[in-house]
Amino acid sequence: MDDSIHIQYLAISQTDLNWGMTTNSVGFQSIAPGMAYPPDVHPSRYSFSTNHGRVLNEFQLLYITRGKGRFSSRSIGADRFVPLSKGNMFLLFPGEWHNYSPDAETGWDEFWIGFQGSHIDYWLANNFFQREKPVYNVGIHSRIVDLYQQAIQVAAEQKSGFQQILAGIVNYLLGLAYSYDKNYVFETSEILTQINRAKILITERFRDIHPKEIAAELHMSYSNFRKIFKEYTGFAPAQYILEIRLTKSKELLANTTIPIKEIAYMMGFENYEYFFTVFKKKNGTTPTAYRQLTQGNFLIGA
């Protein structure tokens, strides 16, 4: 790959805006040790002084694949720099002052892609991405490098529908940043082992196991177990057990003729009324209607 690739001022139509995500720029540059940053070839629209920082009107997601450096922003403190190294991604927010640069002794290689739209605004509003935590520990992955390179190629060609392809790439990159960073926290500790043990216990004994029993078997306090389990899975333990029960119930409704009340008891529900209520709330339909839909209207689900 060339030492510097900058593709900016990408065309954006009303159709692209309606899609919910548009890409403004994408590129790559390799900064050698001792090289001035930003280099002279840096696009003027995005240029800045590392003495003063800058503010953009778009999001940018950068990926460092070689070297190290530092980063600062208004939300983490203008007088505080956090270290960056290869395997880090960091997200720049529109309207947010920021500053970053490679270490003079190492330089760095950086990919970036600039974008905006209602999709990322929604994720930001729901705290999937936070201004106070803009750096993501993802590691070095060829999948991420390939996505940036694909984005550069798609942007260079600008064929019909290219903005929609770039939107898909941005969504994928953001998903990887979120997932890899989240797993990195757990994979560098013993917590992941405990969570996997808990998931095995739930899978084996979902009909009658209680979250407090799981915590006891893991030799953890229930409050701590509940906290880390929810952080990793997105579900509280009790909700996770309920999801397993409902999923297994759907399998039996779709593939057997076992009476629905019997399925409810088999799956560990205290009574049919409770099973009916939670099933309808989760799936938007009753157990009987779900069976009829999956097996055919001629079957009676009672």
Image (cartoon, helix red, strand yellow):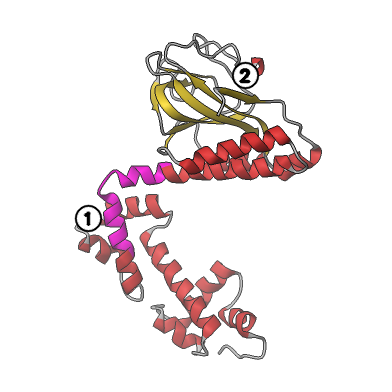
Name the residue at 72% across, 26% down: 9
Name the residue at 55% across, 81% down: 254
Q: Which residue is mark 1?
A: 220
**Can residue 42 be seen here?**
yes
Q: Which residue is mark 2?
A: 46
**Residue 3 picture location, percent across and down:** 54, 22
Q: Closer to us: mark 2 or mark 1? A: 2
Which residue sits furthest left?
Answer: 219
Name the residue at 74% across, 36% down: 158
Q: Is residue 201 magenta?
A: no
CA gap, disc 2 and disc 1: 50 Å
**What span is colored magenta in the figure?**
181-199
- Name which quarter of the figure residue 156 lies in: top right
Name the residue at 80% across, 38% down: 14
- Against 182, is 281 above or below? below
- Against 160, is 69 above or below? above
**Residue 167 picture location, percent across and down:** 65, 42
